[in-house]
Image (cartoon, rainbow, N blue to C red):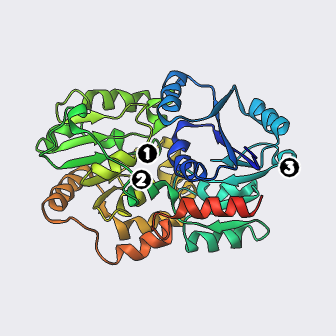
Amino acid sequence: MNIKHTIFFDVQELYYLPQYLPVFKELKKHHNCAITFIFHQNKFESIVKNIILKDQLPHHWVNNKNEALQFYLDKKPTWIFLGNTFPELDKIHLHSKTAQLGHGVGPKKSYYSKSDTPTSVRFVESDYRYQRLCKMYPNDVFVNVGFCKLDPIINEEEDGLCYENLRLDKAKKTILYAPTFYPSSIEKFSKNFPSDFKNYNIIIKPHYFSISMKKYQKQRNLLQHWNTYNNVYLAKVDDYSLLPFLKSADLMISDASSAIIEFAALNKPVIWCTFLQLRWNYRGIFSYRFKARMDKDYDDYEQIATLSPSYDKMISNTNELLKNANKLPENAKIYLERLAGKLDGKASKRIVTYLLENY
């Protein structure tokens, strides 16, 4: 076989995979591409190995970024996909091109600041985000392709959840609680949260950091307590993809997570919790630090989700929506297109077309 292109996917964090996999599957249709996933060693190595086996991922292991950098310099691939910033890109760019493909479309300013260190190209989700980035970084290359993470759902390639395996009742409606790690609503929820929705299934899909980092032990204690209720399924580390949960749930509850945009993009109702656990140095006279962390896009969440400024309001809003609403209001679609772009299931194809036309 005549291999013309070698394409690497740098997987520093497991949660990069759901964004990479649709592109990988599209690339596999092109027989002149050799693809390798570069996994960074961590304490979840056994879980990653199971994922590699399940999805048949060609792979290579590295211990850290420095080892990954040396591997890229030695192998000189055509393209390297990055989910975040990466050191010494100037050296890599002597022999390879790089593409940044972010793992989410969230409201934190880091979405935009990731371009402080420019890759050869950055794939973005919408014309609005494209225009903003072009103004901020006029000398860099951005391509508006759409949000490829949702391609499998839009193209009906995602099966969703098996309720029997989760020990939940398929006859009941399902609430998906998908909080981020910080700033998070987890600590502000009642210890008896599952009993407040005893007539529904509750699936809790915390951020990867909430279940992997020592500093979020208090969050894990509460999550494990909720998991003792018989109407709750707490996602594990190996439930790394949000897609099956997005596909199956009837309503989402979240906070400062990009999952709000992803769920709403499927025309399903979302509860937006604005009661957050903030560190002392983000409160009171230091509240400007929280505002500095969040981008102005955060304000658009109120246009696509039902605002809930307290736990009690969250309960009443959730019950109301589950009884009466199956779809989003029409005006929400305008804001969704601003943040997530056009959702036609072809974002991965557009990415691959760009790669093969610009090697």
Residue matched to label 2: 259
The residue at which mark 3 appears reads as: 90
What is the three-letter code of the residue carrying label 3? Asp
Taking the image as shown, residue 182 lies to the left or right of residue 352, namely left
Instruction: Decide: is 218 above or below 262.
Output: above
Q: Amino acid at mark 2?
A: Ala
- How packed mark 1 is, by other alpha carbons closer than 10 Å (few <14, some 14-19, many 20 or more), is many
How busy is the neighbourhood of tag 3: few (under 14 within 10 Å), some, or many (20 plus)? few
What is the spatial separation of the Cα atoms under label 1 and label 2, in whole angstroms?
Answer: 9 Å
Whether residues under marks 3 and 1 lie with C-beta atoms below 8 angstroms apart, the answer is no
The residue that appears at 66% across and 53% down in the rendered structure is 100
Question: Can you give x and y, in whole percent of width and height, for residue 330 in the image?
Answer: 31, 77
Query: Count the marks: how many?
Result: 3
Could you tell me the amino acid type at mark 1? Thr
SS class, disc 3? helix
Mark 2, other Cα within 10 Å: few <14 / some 14–19 / many ≥20: many
SS label for mark 2: helix
Q: Residue at x 34, y 51 (%)?
A: 246
Sequence-wise first label, 3 or 1? 3
Above-or-below relation of 3 to 61: below
Q: Return the residue at label 1.
A: 180
Q: Is residue 178 visible?
A: no
State left or right for residue 307 relative to residue 350.
left
Please give the name of the residue rendered at 35% of the width and 62% of the height, measured from the top-left corner: 266
Q: Nearer the viewer, residue 192 or 9?
A: 9
Kindly report which numbered mark, 3 or 1, lies closer to the viewer in this rendering: 3
Q: Residue at x 53, y 31 (%)?
A: 52
- Earlier residue among tags 3 and 2: 3
Q: CA distance from mark 3 to mark 1?
A: 33 Å
